[in-house]
Amino acid sequence: MDNQIYDMLVIGGGINGTGIARDAAGRGLSVVLCEKNDLASGTSSKSSKLIHGGLRYLEYGEFRLVREALIEREVLLRAAPHLVRSLRIVLPHHKGLRPKWMLRLGLFIYDHLGG
């Protein structure tokens, strides 16, 4: 590294470190990101890589959290369409689980919280 003075040093190149570094650079700060291995080679490389909107938090009435998660998901879809894409899923149902009407209502609310 040269003798340049930077605004921010981020230690760790996982999902949080790279996200913080990107956000800071996008705000005009000069940033140095330090990672001992390759970017996203630790825990981030072992994740499911799913970016969800917090559907499970609806059950606990965490509407604000779900809304924030859905907004952030949309930010990622717009900012990195080459890395993030929508994925259709199928929710299996069994009589011993929640009633179908509850699942449908939850998905309806989820869709509307997303805007």
Image (cartoon, rainbow, N blue to C red):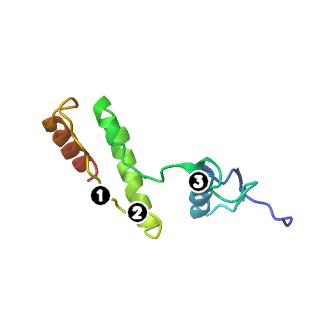
Q: Mark on residue 45?
A: 3
Q: Is residue 26 left or right of residue 111?
A: right
Residue at (32%, 42%) from the top-left corner?
55
Drawn side of residue 46 relative to residue 7, left or right:
left
Name which of mark 1 and mark 3 comes first in the sequence. Answer: 3
For the residue marked with disc 3, what is the amino acid?
Ser
Q: Amino acid at mark 1?
A: Arg
Number of numbered callouts drawn: 3
Q: Quadrant of residue 8?
A: bottom right
Q: Is residue 70 visible?
A: yes
- Alpha carbons under labels 1 and 2: distance apart: 15 Å
Q: Position of residue 31 (x, y in %)?
A: 69, 60
Q: Earlier in the sequence, mark 1 or mark 2?
A: 2
Residue drawn where x is 23% and y is 31% of the image? 97
Other-residue count near label 1 (Cα within 10 Å), few / some / many at <14 / 14–19 / ≥20 = few
Residue holding disc 1:
88
Position of residue 11 measured from the top left corner of the image (x, y, whole percent)? 71, 50
Which of the pair 96/19 is nearer the observer?
96
Give the secondary structure at mark 1: loop
- 46 to the left or right of 3: left
Residue 21: mark in rendering: none
Relative to 10, say whether 29 is above or below. below
Please, which residue is most extreme toward the left here? 101
Q: Which corner quadrant of the image does residue 62 belong to?
A: top left
The quadrant of the rendering that contains the N terminus is: bottom right
Residue 19 % position (x, y): 57, 55
